[in-house]
Image (cartoon, grey):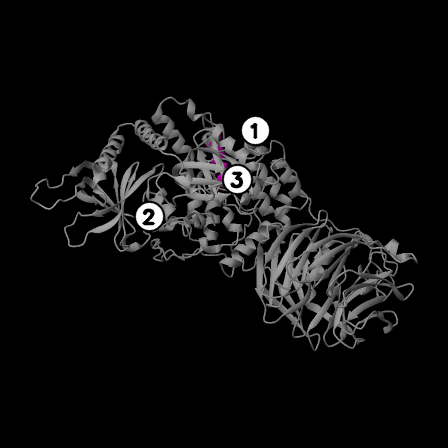
Amino acid sequence: MAFLKTQERARGRFSLLMLDLEEYFFEQHTAYDVTVRSPRKSRGSFKVCSRSIIFDPEDCSEPIIKIPFRDCQKIEILEKDKNPFHEPKPSSISILCRQVIYIKESNVIAPYRIERTTKKLVFQLEIWNKTEDIVQTLLQLHRASCLEKLGDQTAMIEANLQSRLARTAFDKYCFQSVAEKPHMECAVEMVSPLVSNPGHVCVTNENLYFQPLSGYPDKVIQIKLSRVRRIYKRRHGLRPLGLEVFCSENDFWSDIYLKFYSTTDRDDIYYYIATFLENHVAEQTAESFMLLWQRGLLSNYQYLLHLNNLADRSCNDLSQYPVFPWVIADYTSAQLDVTNPSSFRDLSKPIGALNQERLDRLLARYYGMPEPRFMYGSHYSSPGYVLFYLMRVAPEHMLCLQNGRYDHADRMFNSVGETWKNCLEGATDFKELVPEFYGSDPSFLENKLNLDLGRKQSGSLVGDVILPPWASDVSDFLQKNRMALESEFVSEHLHEWIDLVFGFKQRGTAAEAAQNVFHPLTYEGGIDCDSIDDPDERIAMLTQILEFGQTPTQLFTSPHPQRITSKLQTITRSSSITSPNSDFSPVSQNEDSSFEDLTEDSRRMAWSNMGNLIAATKHKIHKEAVTGITVTRDGTAVFSTSQDSTLKMFSKEMREFQRSMSFSNMALSSCLMLADGKTVVCSSWDNNVYFYSIPFGRRQDTLMGHDDAVSTVCWFNDQLYTASWDSTVKVWKCSPESLSSHKRSQFPLLAELEHDTGVNTAGLNPSGSLLATGCKDGSISIWDTGSFVGLQQVHCHSGTILHLSFSPDGRNVLSVGEDCCMKVTDVQTGMVMSSVKAAEEQRCFCWDGSTVLCGGQSGDLLLWDLLSNTLIKRIPAHSGPVTSMWMNELCTSVITGGEDRQTIFWKVDS
């Protein structure tokens, strides 16, 4: 979470958030508070800021003291005793003020206590010969705060800042190596939420350095250029001065955000750092990301993050924080049904247009308004709205934004459902969501800091956020939110919301037609602040823009295309439609059904009845555990492999075992049927892969390619993937046509995919473009089968991964392991979206993306609902662990094999 990462750099209790907005921290000195005469002086840090003095005591039980310059009546030196016969005493700084602000009393984050009374405070510097110089600085800043016009105040403070920056330079003794060669150095400000920290940036041939003027939070911040993965130019304060640097591929928070004083300086460092990036030649555009998303190579979540980045949205700038849509509209049901369109918000309309009655009132006001007109008096994203959602993890940011106070308890983020209701019905509430609602860190929903956020009118204290009934806890809420974001409905309609926020409906007549017109000041280029001559008016305008919120940079000027959703694969009609055994063919059809009736609806119907599985027949044809099952196209023959080293064929027509083939004296680990329906491929613990010809009834070929047991095999589009305990997956050229000839086949090696430990399972996505592998160390790797490049590596299990499989849409991978966990991993982000801890190992499974049929260690079949992470039904099956499972394409028939040596044929009773 961005705020938590920002706070990691903080040292001690003091934070730059204790400063006013647009205030700078200049310098600090060790000093003593000697205001109260007592034997023990309070030692601490005396901090000089552009609009205040802050004293931070070392004793955490004492409050931090803040004295705004505007409240000071007199600042002077208390001279030391000059009597030569007396012991020398150091001079002190005396401050007479109208009010004092106390922060973190008893070391607790809480609203500030303001003592409004004339008070005299006295501080004594540890190095007291600096007292006179510091007092002169304080008097200068006090004069600036007393100027009548805000513009004059700002100009005088800015002159002081630039003078300090000009008198200092980056300390090159901070270089990590004497061999480093500096490329460029200039004055900048490091930006974090609500804070600007001035200093110097220096970039060398190895590192990017930032040295704060004040030495806070560190003397120097270093980023290795070799670690940089992404950089973005930013507009900051409506000007092209920002630069954001990321050392990660997928995180939406950066490692540093810098604001330059010159666009030329910004661009120089941007292009220099870009030369260290592998892909610096081609800068990615919104259109390139759009194509990846359209084709299913980017998740909805990842695509929205990319669009936010390209549209100048940053977690370090609360006026341009990343914006995400509300997608769920149902916050009252006990179960969330992501297959029901009524569960979702209409993504073609802005929040303000979802309630027709409210929209009618807004339009009536809009048409009666003089130019420039606007429909909504508030924005969908602003600093106040961001902190509304995140105040439980960023209370100091809220106190900074609201002058040391929390909002009224009843106006806080108390309930997800109530917030959604207010967004639908409130006269001025049109806010969207922040990325945290679709992330993996639920801490923003919990009051883990035990903050005293006040008491509501009902008498109850503000604590954790109240969740919808369909969420069992905060992690479940985020998982279901993310599942909804990646759902088929949202995938089909997300382009409509993108048109409103980033696209052609953001401005002009298209925006008016879509009821999507906000205040002119929120749009980029809506006003040129530099053209305003009056400094006071310019500062007031800029402040209003930053506090009101800003519309993202427009990325698309034409309608955004819809996502290409998964379509049914072409199904070849079986020649054995009239066969009574055709239930067990890969595509099962009834005699009176037609080819056109084979739709996704029938699969969905089959899964809805999966709890009604009935065991049709049972057969014991092996002497040891069954390890693999595959079926011929017409469903007449079932092939199975076993640890007894045999491949056996069972005839459905004859209802009896027909063939047996032994390739070696070691166990066979898996089997699959090639597309020609004539060849069975078997993997073996003897390091080999065997090819069995069904027409000839004999071994046709042998592939000797590994140094340890082959654990499983996959095949797609003439490419054979063999996974092994030797820590590799090898990719071979393997076409059914070459196997059908009488000559010994050649298997050219196309690629060798290296892993850290033995590969125990592997699977391809439906399009064959991605390969997932599961290892003995509990890690999953995702590979691009076109380039054979690794895309993700996720350590998600604490033991060996036993089985994994892509979801039908290819977006997620489900894995089961020795740790008894089932994990759903997002393919594009590598994020674990769902985790279920079962009471027993799940050895094998089939799933439809939300429901899973597992074979358990107990021998039972277990039906799980991943939307609610609940066990729906337990079906008695084998007398020992279920070790293999096969399901036909229409999901109406299942075959299981177990350690009890049995093969059971199942039908879904509809």
Which stretch did the figure color magenta? 356-367
Q: Tell me the SS state at disc 1.
A: helix
> Marks 3 and 1: which is nearer the front?
1
Q: Which residue is located at x 68 percent, y 66 percent?
A: 844
Tag count: 3
Query: Is residue 702 left or right of 70 when viewed as pictured?
Result: right
In the rendered image, residue 547, in percent from the top left (x then y), is placed at 41, 37
Whether residue 497 is visible here, answered yes or no, is yes
Residue for badge 2: 14
Decide whether residue 366 is among the magenta residues.
yes
**Image quarter of residue 579:** bottom right
Q: Residue furthest front?
A: 178
Residue at which label 1 appears: 509
Q: Is residue 545 above or below residue 458?
A: above
- In the displayed structure, 467 sits above or below 902; it is above
- The x, y position of residue 265, in whole percent, is 48, 30
**Few, some or many C-alpha atoms within 10 Å of disc 1 (few <14, some 14-19, many ≥20)?**
few
- Mark 2 falls on what kind of element? loop
Name the image quarter holding residue 335: bottom right
> Which one is in front in this view, the residue at disc 2 or the one at disc 3?
2
Q: Main secondary structure of the magenta part?
A: helix
Disc 3: which residue: 353
In the image, 874 versus 161, the foreground residue is 161
N-terminal label among 3 and 1: 3
